[in-house]
Amino acid sequence: MNTANKLTLLRVAMIPAFLLVLYLDVPGANYWALAIFAAASVTDTLDGYIARHYNQITDFGKFMDPLADKCLVTAAMLWFVEVGQMPAWALLIVIVREFGVSGLRMVAADKGRVIAAGWSGKVKTAATMVCIIIMLLLPGQTVVNQICTAVIVLTTIYSGVEYFMKNSDILARAK
């Protein structure tokens, strides 16, 4: 197994550790969870760089890397919903967008077309990661939580709409 794939698996292993720290409710749990989340986020950047730079792109990595990202973000957002830092409808928007874009990519792949990550998707991912970090740093700040939730929802909707608009021909041909 190459280095990029090992980093992806490390990120997957960090997800239960991240949640365990939050559920144990030890002193400074949010900060420990923040450190784990930040380290997992860094592995995402690092494994992508290594895969591209050292030609370590594999089918496993193409499948597992985005799945690991979605699981990490969803785990954090589920925690925020559970503790009242984020409304469930906001998480639902994120999940629906992820399923929609993944489905669109599957249909496109069936038609012999690859849909690369667009700029708005990268902005959405970066904004979401930053907002999660802020929400872990400032757990009791209602206004901050509301602003972060709004940023996550708006970037998620924008990038989802953009993916579907740019690739509407795929769905038109899929009928």
Image (spheres, rainbow, N blue to C red):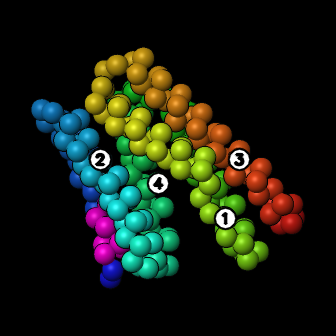
Residue lying at 30% horizontally and 26% vertically, measured from the top left? 139
Q: Amino acid at mark 1?
A: Ile
Magenta region, residue range: 3-12
Q: For label 3, count other residues whose C-alpha is less than 10 Å away and answer few (under 14), some (14-19) or many (20+).
A: some
**Which badge, 3 or 2, is on the more N-terminal residue?**
2
Tag on residue 162?
A: 3
Say which quadrant the C terminus sits in: bottom right
Residue corresponding to mark 4: 70
From mark 2 to mark 1, how far is it between C-alphas? 28 Å
Secondary structure category for the residue under label 2: helix
Identify whether 142 is placed above or below 132.
above
| Tag 1 near tag 3, CB within 8 Å | no
**Which badge, 1 or 3, is on the more N-terminal residue?**
1
**Which badge, 2 or 1, is on the more N-terminal residue?**
2
Q: For label 1, count other residues whose C-alpha is less than 10 Å away and answer few (under 14), some (14-19) or many (20+).
A: some
Q: Residue lying farthest left?
A: 27
Residue lying at 46% horizontally and 29% vertically, measured from the top left? 148
Residue corresponding to mark 1: 115
Q: For label 2, count other residues whose C-alpha is less than 10 Å away and answer few (under 14), some (14-19) or many (20+).
A: some
Tag on residue 38?
A: 2
